[in-house]
Amino acid sequence: MLDRTNKSLLRGITDKFMSAKGLGIRPKQLKALIATLKLMESNGISERGFKEVKGEKIMFDMGSWFGVDGKCGTTCCIGGTAEMLVDDNRLFEDVRVSEEPEALYNLFFSYVGDITVERAAKQLRNYLETGLCNSLWGLDEGIQNVHEISIGLEKYARGSV
């Protein structure tokens, strides 16, 4: 359950977001993702070092769902952070197993490159507002657009467009 601190993080930022039903996720998952976004946007988590969150030292790392890093603390990605914030390490198990909804699966697992908190927060916000997440979201936008154009050209050449 979200504690008082996390509930205060949710106020005032949810008016642009799609509903849980619209995103194809459960309300508890949506609340956890919004709390994660607010934590990220308030510099409450960093990829450069450990910060204390809910009595634990954590560091953002898209390559680690939720990994204990010896005496230093815990590393976690978007999904792992969301699960930690609501004390439910199985909250997104359905996404990990079924790879659905696809956009959320892409957000959690289909990134490219080293992802900063700033970049991840931007993509998470985009997902919450649009329900979309490209599987190449870690690439520079210019490179991503070139890749999408090349895929479109390949489909055109095959006659599938």
Image: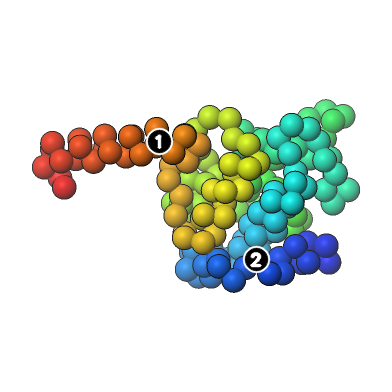
Nearest the camera: 87 or 32? 32
Nearest the camera: 118 or 110? 118
- Residue 142, numbered label: 1
Please name the amino acid that badge 1 sits on. Gly
Helix or strand or loop: what does disc 2 sit on? Answer: loop
Q: Quadrant of residue 134?
A: top left
Helix or strand or loop: what does disc 1 sit on? Answer: helix
> Which image quadrant: the N terminus?
bottom right
Please name the amino acid that badge 2 sits on. Ile
Residue furthest to the left in view is: 159
Residue identified by numbered label 2: 13
Q: Is residue 29 above or below residue 149?
A: below
Give me the residue at 53% from left, 70% from top. Answer: 19
- How far from the left and from the top, in percent, is residue 143? 39, 32
Give me the residue at 74% from left, 31% from top. Answer: 48
Give me the residue at 66% from left, 54% from top. Answer: 37
- How far from the left and from the top, in percent, is residue 18? 52, 67
Q: Quadrant of residue 70?
A: top right
Residue furthest to the front in view is: 142
Please tell me whether mark 1 or mark 2 is closer to you in this view.
1
**Mark pair 1, 2: CA separation:** 29 Å
Side of 29 where 152 appears, left or right: left
- Residue 69, numbered label: none
